[in-house]
Image (tube, rainbow, N blue to C red):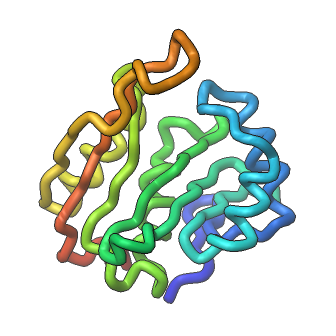
């Protein structure tokens, strides 16, 4: 089980509630969907085993919030991936994914799912790249059509399902 790993000057670990506020602030400086600060505290407290904090000199520069759905024990659902502008293009999101998938909490995970809006090219590239790296498929389907959202400008959310993942890579699953 990996609890900490260092790549360059960025360390990857399980977040604590002390990271929740920094996660919320990072989201609010990006185009990610904004959730309440309470959501990040809850994710750190109750789902820390399936979340990742990326830090550079104790400053949060990236995170993943994720959970294993109760009725899909072989699947990890990625709620949000946030990367500070100072770290974009350096592979931090991919390294956080590998950190997450290498954990004991993900030992039975064979599939990774996330919802992505059609305009989010970075997330699409991340999940398609993960499928390529694990030599598996990435199936895309509509999860929540735009008309379900109360906001007029919310895009549809597409499910990206990567898997099955069986091959080990960089200490991953």
Which residue is pictured at 66% across the width and 28% down the height?
Answer: 30
Q: Is residue 30 above or below residue 59?
A: above
Residue found at the very far top of the displayed protein: 152
Give the vertical position of 79 relative to 156 (above or below): below
Question: On the picture, is 68 further left or further right than 152?
Answer: left
- Quadrant of the image occupied by residue 77: bottom left
Question: What is the x, y in percent for residue 36?
Answer: 77, 42
Residue 57 seen in the figure = no
Count the labels in the image: 0
Res 142 seen here: yes
- Quadrant placement of the C terminus: bottom left
Residue at coordinates 69% horizontally, 48% vertically from top-left?
A: 61
From the top left corner, tell me how far across and down residue 159 is, in percent: 31, 42
Residue 11 appears in which quarter of the rendering?
Answer: bottom right
Q: For this view, does 83 lie left or right of residue 1?
A: right
Snapshot quadrant of residue 113? bottom left
Q: Nearer the viewer, residue 124 or 156?
A: 156
* 38 over 102 or under it: above or below: above
| Residue 132 in the image, given as x and y percentages of width and height | 18, 52
At x 29% / y 53%, what residue is drawn? 130
Residue 111 lies left or right of residue 104; in this view the side is left
Q: Nearer the viewer, residue 154 or 27?
A: 154
């Amino acid at each position: 089980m990996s609890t900490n790993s260092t790549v360059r000057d960025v360390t990857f670990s399980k977040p604590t509630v002390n990271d929740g506020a920094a996660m919320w602030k990072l989201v609010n400086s990006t185009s990610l969907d904004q959730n309440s600060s309470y959501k990040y505290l809850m994710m750190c407290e109750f789902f820390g085993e399936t979340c990742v904090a990326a830090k550079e000199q104790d400053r949060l520069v990236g995170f993943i919030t994720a959970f294993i759905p109760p009725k899909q024990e072989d699947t990890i659902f990625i709620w949000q991936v946030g990367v500070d502008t100072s770290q974009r293009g350096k592979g931090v999101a991919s390294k956080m994914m590998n950190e997450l998938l290498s954990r004991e909490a993900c030992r039975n995970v064979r599939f990774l799912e996330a919802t992505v809006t059609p305009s989010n090219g970075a997330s699409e590239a991340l999940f398609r790249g993960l499928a390529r790296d694990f030599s598996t498929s990435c199936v895309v389907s509509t999860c929540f059509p735009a008309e379900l959202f109360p906001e007029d400008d919310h895009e549809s959310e597409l499910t990206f399902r990567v898997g099955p993942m069986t091959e080990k890579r960089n200490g991953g699953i």
